[in-house]
Amino acid sequence: MIKIFESLNLDVESIPTGILKEKSPAPAEADTGDKRLDDIIENYHQLNEAGQQQLADQAEGLTYIPKYKKCDSVSEEETEVG
């Protein structure tokens, strides 16, 4: 069955959902000039749809934690310190 899916370019992981999906094209190697970002993109492409959503949710969650945010202005820096 897997060989049939591969020959039809269908995603084997879509079997349990009952909705057959075409395989995503192999991602081009990431080269943004930022090794960390390239690694994140590479990891993203290794995940299934649920994993990709989880990665996006966790990345968004980090933006709400002041410890991990870039400061947009001096007033934000003063707020975090004071």
Image: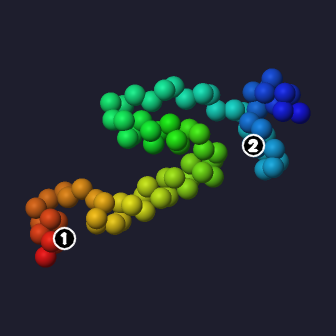
Q: Residue at x 81, y 23 (%)?
A: 7
**Residue type at the position of mark 2:** Glu
9 relative to 4 in the view: left or right = left
Identify the coloring: rainbow
Q: Which residue is mark 2?
A: 13
Q: Which residue is mark 1?
A: 80
For label 2, the SS is helix
Seen in the picture, residue 48 relative to 78 is either above or below; the reply is above
Please tell me in which quadrant of the rendered image residue 4 appears. Answer: top right
Q: Residue at x 56, y 48 (%)?
A: 52
Q: Residue at x 76, y 32 (%)?
A: 10
x and y, in percent, of residue 5 in the image: 82, 31
Seen in the picture, residue 55 relative to 81 is either above or below; the reply is above
Q: Residue at x 48, y 26 (%)?
A: 29
User: Distance of mark 2 from mark 1, alpha carbons?
Assistant: 45 Å
x and y, in percent, of residue 68 in the image: 31, 60
Bin the neighbour count of mark 1 within 10 Å (Cα to Cα): few under 14, some 14-19, many 20 and up.
few
72 relative to 63 in the view: left or right = left
x and y, in percent, of residue 59 in the image: 43, 55
For label 1, the SS is helix
Q: Nearer the viewer, residue 26 or 20?
A: 26
- Mark 2 or mark 1, which has the lower sequence index? 2
x and y, in percent, of residue 63 in the image: 36, 60
**Residue type at the position of mark 1:** Glu
